[in-house]
Amino acid sequence: MTNQRITPNRITQLAANEVFVFGSNLQGHHYGGAARIAEEKFGAIFGQGVGLQGQSYAIPTMQGGVETIKPYVDEFIEFAKQHPELTFLVTRIGCGIAGFKDREIAPLFRGAIGIENIALPQSFMDVIGG
């Protein structure tokens, strides 16, 4: 059992050092789901589909299968390790509009377990153990 941080089910505000991690598309068209919330509330930039923007971090999930998402998740985990002053609240990326199941996406985040500044959804932790 790990002391992994768990992302709140509903995020309506962030502390100054918190970052909302959401699923996006490569074009950065934040029309719905968590992407829309990221743009409306947390500084996501329309037209930017990857990386840090305001108090949000985009991980593309709409470009193909799970294997196309993995490099972006790996990049995110490395980014989070390099920025311990920030706390990253990962939403259920890919499990809304993109149509994936938690059991498909959660394993991509195994490398985030134990990283103190990354919080994962409980549903991801239920899949990958924690």
Image: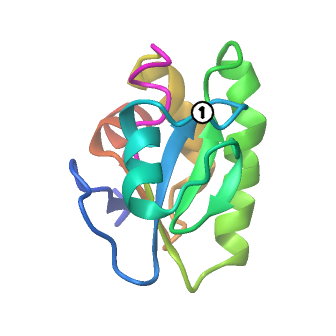
Image-based side of 97 in relation to 86, left or right: left
Say above or below: 46 vs 55: above
The answer to which quarter of the image holds residue 60 is top right
Q: Which residue is mark 1?
A: 29
Where is 67 relative to 116, above or below? Answer: above
Q: Look at the image and tell me in which quarter the N terminus lies.
A: bottom left
Q: Which residues are magenta?
A: 91-99
Residue in the image at 69% along x and 29% along y:
69
Q: Judge from the rendering whether residue 23 lies leftward or rightward of residue 15; answer left or right.
A: right
Q: How is the image coloured?
A: rainbow
Q: Can you give x and y, in whole percent of width and height, for residue 120 in the image? A: 40, 51
**Residue 60 in magenta?**
no
**In the image, is residue 96 part of the stretch drawn in magenta?**
yes
Q: Position of residue 89 (x, y in %)?
A: 42, 60
Q: Main secondary structure of the magenta part?
A: loop
Residue 88 is situated, as x and y percent measured from the top left of the image, at 49, 65
Q: Is residue 70 above or below residue 22?
A: above
The amino acid sitting under disc 1 is His
> Residue 17: horizontal and vertical position, in percent?
46, 82
* Secondary structure type for disc 1: loop
Dot 1 alpha-carbon crowd within 10 angstroms: few under 14, some 14 to 19, many 20 or more: some
Task: Tell me what residue is drawn at x 51 percent, y 20 percent.
Answer: 104
